[in-house]
Image: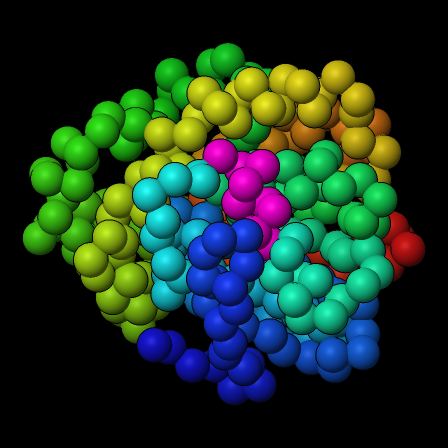
């Protein structure tokens, strides 16, 4: 298990599963919750946690089925995953509203949290993803979303070849392929090559239709919380902005130059500064 200076590891039983998480910063400060995506873990935030921890109590869980969290058979719709995170926040004795930052599958998870628990979120930042059910073209344009949805077949084809398969995404999704270094790749591969690691990640894609139904319902009442939406110029570009503008009333969006899909690792200094400025304005 990877370690980072100033970061503490913990585990908690919440919502019928067991989550691994890390914390950093002053526990008495306002909580800032960081939600990772696939095929990564909390470790994708390692470069930005120190800056965030200077002002906030940072909480970065491994989402159910990924990283060092348990992989139950069910519960991968984003409403359930968001409830995991919300119960973790309560388990850690944070009673007030939180700020959320979500990347990749962490983006729809963060949106589900903000939409389901509107009085408990004061700011929402989302990176490099779309929202199922909001943009009908999003699913068809990404080949791997259709592949990962197939029951059992991806596990059988990728098992034993995790490094080859996942490295393709780390390389092809990047503006700067060196941003995810060998140490990070080894940490991610440790988790996704573990028993159940592949299945837990693929289940996020298999919940797409359930997510789409939930999100269309949520979108009937636009979010009022301030939203920051960022896309990499070599990846999703304006898509996160368009999707959030469809479901929220107050959206600040930007296409980030010299960045692909892996914003926290490709442009960490920029991301930390941009998010902190957004949060200061949102207060």
Q: Position of residue 82 (x, y in %)?
A: 59, 45
Toward the bottom, the furthest residue is 5
Q: Which one is in front, 154 or 16?
A: 16
Q: Is residue 5 above or below residue 268?
A: below
Residue 207: image quadrant is top left
Magenta stretch encompasses residue 1: no
Q: Residue shown at 45%/62% (left/top)?
A: 18
Q: Position of residue 176 (x, y in %)?
A: 39, 53
Count of numbered circles in the view? 0
In this rendering, does residue 252 appear at all? Answer: no
Residue 107: image quadrant is top right
Magenta stretch encompasses residue 84: yes
Query: Is the N terminus in the top left, top right, bottom left or bottom right quadrant?
Result: bottom left
Q: How is the image coloured?
A: rainbow
Q: Residue shown at 49%/72% (left/top)?
A: 11
Q: Residue shown at 84%/44% (left/top)?
A: 119
Query: Is the C terminus in the top left, top right, bottom left or bottom right quadrant?
Result: bottom right
Left or right of residue 246: residue 225: right
Q: Main secondary structure of the magenta part?
A: helix
Q: Residue shown at 17%/52% (left/top)?
A: 162
Residues in magenta, as a range:
77-85
Q: Position of residue 155 (x, y in %)?
A: 17, 41
In this rendering, does residue 165 appear at all? Answer: yes
């Amino acid at each position: 298990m990877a370690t980072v200076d100033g970061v503490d590891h913990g585990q908690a039983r919440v919502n019928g599963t067991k989550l691994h998480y890390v914390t950093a910063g002053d526990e008495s400060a306002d909580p800032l919750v960081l939600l990772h995506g696939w095929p990564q873990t909390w470790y994708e935030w390692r470069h930005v946690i120190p800056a965030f921890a200077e002002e906030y109590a940072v909480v970065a869980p491994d989402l159910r089925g990924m990283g060092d969290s348990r992989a139950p058979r069910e519960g991968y719709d984003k409403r359930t995953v968001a409830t995991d995170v919300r119960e973790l926040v309560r388990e850690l004795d944070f009673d007030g509203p939180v700020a959320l930052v979500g990347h990749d599958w962490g983006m729809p998870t963060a949106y589900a949290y903000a939409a389901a628990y509107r009085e408990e979120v004061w700011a929402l930042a989302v990176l490099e993803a779309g929202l199922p059910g909001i943009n009908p073209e999003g699913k068809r344009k990404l080949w791997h979303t259709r592949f990962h949805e197939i029951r059992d077949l991806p596990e059988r084809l990728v098992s034993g070849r995790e490094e080859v398969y996942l490295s393709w995404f780390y390389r092809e999704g990047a503006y700067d392929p060196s941003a995810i270094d060998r140490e990070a790749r080894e940490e991610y591969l440790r988790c996704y090559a573990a028993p159940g690691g592949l299945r837990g990640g693929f289940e996020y894609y298999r919940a797409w239709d359930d997510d789409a139904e939930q999100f269309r319902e949520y979108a009937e009442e636009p979010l009022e919380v301030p939203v920051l939406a960022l896309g990499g110029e070599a990846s999703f570009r304006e898509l996160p902005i368009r999707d959030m503008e469809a479901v929220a009333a107050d959206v600040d969006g930007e296409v980030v130059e010299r960045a692909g899909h892996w914003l926290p690792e490709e442009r960490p200094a920029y991301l930390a500064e941009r998010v902190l400025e957004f949060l200061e304005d949102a207060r």
